[in-house]
Image (tube, rainbow, N blue to C red):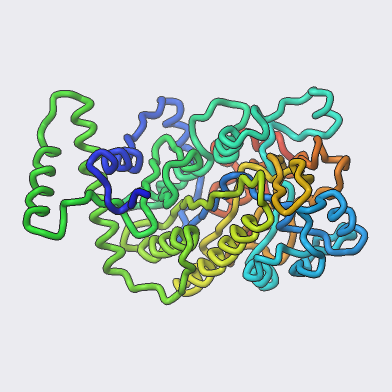
Amino acid sequence: MNNPDDLSRRRFIGRACAAVGATGMLSALAQIRMIGALAADSTPTDYKALVCLFLYGGNDSNNLLIPTDNANYNIYATDRTVLALPQNTLLPISPKTYSDGRTWGLHPSVPEIQALFGQGKMALLANTGTLVQPVTLAQYNAGTVALPPQLFSHANQQVEWQSSVPDQPFTTGWGGRLADIVNALNTNPKISMSVTVAGQNSFQGGKTVTQVAFNSTGAVVLSGTSGSTLATSRAAAQQSLLNLQEQNLFEAAFGGMTSSAIADSNLLNSVLAAAPKLQTAFPNTTIGSQMQMIANMIGAAPQLGLTRQVFFASLGGFDLHSDQLGAHATLLQQLSQGLNAFNSATNELGVANQVTTFTASDFSRTFNTNGTLDTTAGSDHGWGSHHLIMGGAVNGGDIYGQVPLLELGGPLDTGRGRWIPTTSVDEYAATLATWFGVSATNLPIVLPNIGRFATSNLGFMA
């Protein structure tokens, strides 16, 4: 396995170019539109951060939120067969207002999420997914409305979730467009407001704001350029080469981007080294390390000149076509513990009300198994799924949207328990963008299709 902190020159430059990018030139029309957008949004004095946590592979949310009343649990258990969780292991929750005659419990691996829900710091958004426009089962079966291209495809649905424009070729992500709109609020930024600790992604792709990539221990550094006299000399020689006035435009751009990446890395690592250490203990997991790095970045925001930040983290491994029960339990445990530690860290930093974390995923899983009826069973690619939103500004302790009837052949079942989403990614994103400071006038710039759906505010943010 490659050590991300021990990079060859080629790997460093590749990641540097991805991290820094080149500032794209907007068309005259786009520039005018962006200037108008920035002028219309009021300038806040407070800090806010939005954290996207993408669950790659398709999280089986049918086993995240489960009916616990006998009648509906029995339907769930009958149709899920060997994937059904024992009724007596489910963690009960009591939504504040959501009521459809069913009672609810969470997967037994997420006691921290149960506690956060009970404290009003966590909300659940039900049956959300990619949509071009609202669709009924009759319309789906008749083929009379446009659907997201390549439904049930990992690569396509990941991009469509992260762009929120499924009916157009990918150009930018909704997190990138969000950053383009609000970046003017960062009056003296020393690094980009869009930070990924999980590699390059579509979500943060913007026109004017580029995503900068760090790993879970800090900024990427070029190996062999520190720690000894020889290394220092090597770094100085390399910088001299990068500072040369190149006639070739490609070479000049390459030198400029690499120099900027080195400067950003040095700046961030020095700021993080000088910052007070968090007392919050994070789990020693992939997601725990990522969330700890994001917490450290939030703590360093004043030194970096940032009042708005957009982060991207991820947890993979959810594409469970076999041995689903055990692997899914482990993944949900890591998710629950990582979110709980991050919540504690935001409280320690005094910014719990200013940081909102939300989950996204390719899709959910089929309600029935992929054919195996023993402990090795798995599931296949689904559609609508449930998601978590966490933070002090969240109207937590409640379920938003509509939980489908968890029964094969139900009114939202396109086959095998692939639920038609009753809430669109656009509505989900619009609610978060509004909290982040985007005005109603400018919301269509961030989410061009939002006018096709019932609401731009689902109510889960205060």
- Looking at this view, name the residue that lies furthest to the bottom: 279
Q: Nearer the viewer, residue 284 or 445?
A: 284
Could you tell me residue 18's position as x and y percent?
35, 39
Could you tell me residue 99's position as x and y percent?
85, 60
Q: Nearer the viewer, residue 55 or 144?
A: 55
Residue lying at 56% horizontally and 64% vertically, measured from the top left = 339
Residue lying at 39% horizontally and 64% vertically, measured from the top left = 296
- In the image, taking residue 254 as reference, residue 311 lies left or right, namely right
Residue lying at 60% horizontally and 49% vertically, measured from the top left = 318
Q: Which of 377 and 26 is in front in this view?
A: 377
Q: Which of 255 and 320 is in front in this view?
A: 320
- In the image, taking residue 240 as reference, residue 76 lies left or right, namely right
Could you tell me residue 19's position as x and y percent?
34, 43
Count of numbered labels shown in the rendering: 0
Could you tell me residue 246's position as x and y percent?
13, 28
Quadrant location of the C terminus in the rendered image: bottom right
In this picture, is 334 found above or below 27?
A: below
Could you tell me if residue 157 is visible in this image?
yes
Could you tell me if residue 39 is visible in this image?
no
> Which image quarter: residue 145?
top right
> Which image quarter: residue 137?
top right
- In the image, taking residue 380 as reference, residue 284 lies left or right, namely left
Residue lying at 42% horizontally and 49% vertically, measured from the top left = 196
